[in-house]
Image (spheres, rainbow, N blue to C red):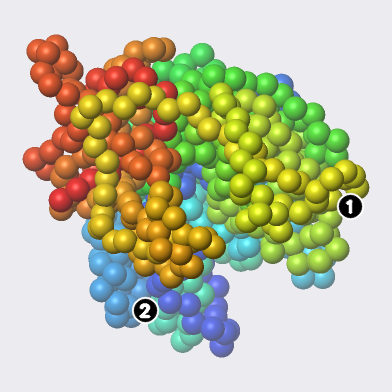
Amino acid sequence: MGGGMTGMATEVGWKFPSLNHGTREGFNVSAIDMFKSERLQALVREMIQNSLDARKIAGEPVVVRFTLDTTSDLASTGFTELARYLEAAHDLERTAAGKSFYARALDQIEDGSITLLGVHDYNTKGLTGPIYDPPENPQSGPWLALVKGAGMTFKDSNAALGSFGHGSRAPFAMSELRTLFYLSRIEHQEGHETRFQGKSILQSVPLTTVTGENEWCVATGYFGVRQGCLPLTNGRVPSWAIAARPELSADALSVGTSVYIPEPYGVDEEELLWAGVKLAVVANFYYAVLTNKLVVHLGQRERIDADSIAQAFDDVVETDLINTLNPTEKVFERLESARTVRKSDLAGELELDGFGAISWYLRLDGVVGRHVGVARGNGMLITRAAEKLQRFPGLKPFDLFVCVSGDQGSELLRKLENPEHTEFAFDRISDMAERKSAEIAYSKFQSSVRALLRDHASVEIEEEVAVDDLDDWLRGDLGTGSEEEKGEPNRALRVAFKKSRSHRENKQTELTGDAETAGRGTSGGAGKHRSTGGTIPGDGGGSAKGTLRTGMPVRNLRVVRLSAGSGVADVAFTPVDGSRKTLVLLRSGDSETERLEFRTEDEAAAGAPWRTSLEFAELSATARKRLRLVFHPADLDYAIEGRLEP
């Protein structure tokens, strides 16, 4: 862009390059929209994992500081000029969402001051590499990949979590102006260099009212040297950007990177902002902080490190603050992995050939369900639903966290990881030979995880019974084993039973329907087998009574016993909707589902009778419910499920 309008011919400022008859870009950007439901969580995950990837001194933690500042210098920050592009976009946009976005952005600039959320890292290499990418000699590096790239992949090590792909758009989702500023101090052969550049993602607009040029521009613009969209360096870096970066020495700018997010969402209450950042840190980086890979500062008020991470977890998760923050179900899931590292019953390390070192933490007490959380490299939790690690028949409820820190294993998982760093998938490897090799290596990993769980989470067998009568039914399915195994065919099925507890007189069961169904088998019988209900044609004249659970299951039920052998437990759950208000707790896994007896603490103190349900005056599907209940101590030895009835 050249001159044409007053103030636009200067060398430094915003430049949205010419579209040059290419494709017009609209307001909606899917790579940004995908993070809208978890703006702050996504920002913290992306920024910290980028910092961990750029670690400078091995063995020392990466330090990340979050700050909040305001500036009224709209000219040197470029906002006065950016407002012209926002006005052009507002006039062009036709959707209600787009119109509203641009109107709010313009209002915030017209207010005369801009709030800046800063994320600063230390003990990192900064955004190194070239700043210019000539077509005759293509370049790559962290600066180009993050600031000037879209979907570009760059990794400095096998442990690197990110590649500056879709995840690099997460900070833009946090800004009400969809704008960022990057400040980075690096080392190179000639000494040190400081770099600064702004980046805004809006939409294509006609430049007629902005620069006077009779053409369209692309959606992404840059603040810096207009010619070539280059960054400002060293003495040309705006003083406000340097002053806003916290330093131990006022006379020296340390090596590292600062990213400034103008007008961040959700900063009306600063206390809640820091609480939200703390929640994101403990949910995603508990292990990284615990193992001294990471230290996080929240403004000037709090430091989260290996000594304080447990207290940080308790402050945000074990208090009513969690209800105020109202995290999504995904965050609650991540918190369960953090809880496992925080309160593990067992922990250890494995060394796998061709995969490397694996650290693990296992929690068995107070767990509902069976989950494996997987992290790699520097310790950020990736997923709790990894490939081939989702179903675990024959194991008691458990929660396992594993971190694959070995180079070979971390590199394999990186190839399987999606751009959002939330799941693994083999179809991300397009080369079939490479995919097959990855499947073999991963199979060894998941087999080792399952072996670990069999050693520590198997259901205790107290009695075994040989049932010869079932052999005629199932012999075909049981077979004779693998070709390598020798001996007689299987003639008996071994069935293990857990010794049942004595039944209390007031035991209640959940029954739905009294349908009689024909019994299976060659001779029928009295129909003593239970089924899940319904009519199934059979060969005999017997019947089976149908039995099903009633109500709707609650989400993310957590029952945590206060101490070993105690009957007092904290119960937390998320309702499915607001119409069902009666809570029923049941012993999980039985075909005949037994309601558990419980009392509130006040009822227990007063000697009130046991109850089997609890009605609430109000429940909301958007608010997590927490309460403390008293159970028969033996009931807490079993997995528990919760349901809400009308």
566 or 327, which lies in front?
A: 566
Q: Residue at x 70, y 54 (%)?
A: 475
Q: Are marks 2 and 1 in contact (CB under 8 Å)?
A: no
Which amino acid, by three-letter code, is at mark 2? Thr
How many labels were placed on the picture? 2
Horizontal side of residue 20 vs 499, given as left or right: right
Binning the other alpha carbons within 10 Å of mark 1 as few (below 14), some (14 to 19) or many (20 upward) gives few
Q: Amino acid at mark 1?
A: Glu
Q: Residues within 10 Å of mark 2 (few under 14, many from 20)?
A: some
Would residue 347 be seen by someone viewing this image from the given angle? yes
Quadrant position of the N terminus in the picture: bottom right
Q: Earlier in the sequence, mark 2 or mark 1?
A: 2
Horizontally, is 232 left or right of 335 in the view?
right
Q: Which residue is mark 2?
A: 209
For image coordinates 64% across by 51% down, the residue present is 387
Near-viewer residue (330 or 471): 471
Q: Is residue 307 above or below residue 474?
A: above
Q: Between tags 2 and 1, which lies in front? A: 1
Q: Quadrant of residue 333?
A: top left
Q: Is residue 455 above or below residue 512?
A: above
